Amino acid sequence: MTKEKCFILGIETSCDETSAAVVQDGRKILSNVISSQVELHKRYGGVVPEIASRKHIEMIDIVINDALEQAGMTLEEVDAIGVTYGPGLVGALLVGVSTAKAMAFALDKPLIGVHHIEGHIAANYLEHSDLMPPYMCLVASGGHSHIVWVKDYKQFEIMGQTRDDAAGEAFDKVARILGLGYPGGPLIDKLAKQGNKDAVHFPRARFEDGSLDFSFSGVKTAVLNYIHRLEQIGESYDRADIAASFQHAVVEVLVDKTIAAAKKAGVNAIALAGGVAANSALRELMVKKASEEHMKVYYPSPLLCTDNAAMIACAAYYGLQEGMEAGLDLNAVPNLPLLSSNLPNWK
Ligand code: KG4
Ligand code: ZN
């Protein structure tokens, strides 16, 4: 694109947030409207896919109109449309993808398919004008825990990933065990502030030498066993201490492996992305340990850590720069892998 200013309309509907945003030149947010369904799903203790799809259909037009209005723009003034097409819930993704395709066709504008995780990584560009590849990014959300070497804006290498539960999933499950509610991450984060992180030593999964993979199902089971054992012998326990100790066990592994990956790749910048990147203990420990290695740490503000369309518009901007335009056969891909060369439907 040689045009002076480039306005991208981003659309995100992969899970339980209906979001639309307008971003200028990949870095400046003009609007970022997020309609969360969390209250609807709370009573079920997790996202119900059918309910999510229906709510997206109800909200999508309203959210897009709000995003355009807040940006002071008409649809015709938008240069391209970026949309999450995977991974995620297929019915939920389809609402965003179908809407984006219809608009791109009607307006004859470029359509860019965005990988959801790539969007989370890109959220960092929206608030840190000095951040540029290469850097190491820890992506930790409800569905993913990946260490991604961002070699260039559209070039990624996965250095490590979870072999079972995602970090956010472990937070949500332990919160349920502790009777805290849903979503569990922010509730554990809050409760842990009143607890002692060294009260209980929960196990950290270790793999063969050098592996940067994670495993979080063991620590979740260890919390469950610990509570059951105390209950069986009629002893009380401190929920805040358990929350703090569990959180520390997860966060320590995330931090140590991300720093090891950065050293291995020879990069001196680390970024955090995804819902778990909002965790205060993770941010604190990453900054502390990274500074000991003379590495700089970047993370988005809490709102941009969770699902939002500004991050999708940002990732779409860099896709557009590379000419990665999608055809109207773009489809929702629920288990889309994070490798640019695997992205289908590019002209
Ligand atoms: O990225 P996200 O909004 O949705 C997915 O793409 O999955 O991440 C949601 C996840 C949930 O598991 C939630 O419990 C977790 O991020 N989370 C947190 C915090 N805020 C959200 N986990 C730990 N500490 C937090 N402060
Ligand atoms: Zn997400």
Image (cartoon, grey):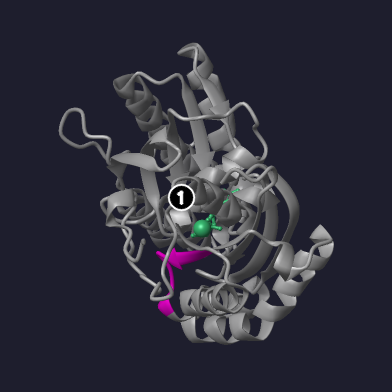
| Ligand 1 falls in quadrant | bottom right
Q: Residue 217, image x and y in percent?
A: 32, 54
Residue that mark 1 sits on: 118
The answer to whether 94 is drawn above or below residue 242 in the figure is below
Q: Report whether the residue tagged 1 is closer than 8 Å to ligand 2.
A: no
Which residue occupies 49% across, 20% down? 290
Which residue occupies 39% across, 61% down? 232
Towards the viewer: 291 or 325: 325
Q: Residue 154, image x and y in percent?
A: 41, 43
Magenta segment includes 72: no
Label 1, secondary structure: give it. helix
Which residue occupies 55% across, 70% down? 13
Q: Residue 171, image x and y in percent?
A: 48, 54
The answer to whether 307 is drawn above or below residue 128 in the figure is below
24 relative position to 306: left or right: right
Q: Amino acid at mark 1?
A: Glu
Q: Residue 256, image x and y in percent?
A: 38, 28
Quarter of the view holding residue 279: top right
| Residue 56 at least partly seen | yes
Q: Residue furthest left?
A: 208
Q: Residue furthest front?
A: 2
Q: Which residues are magenta?
A: 83-90
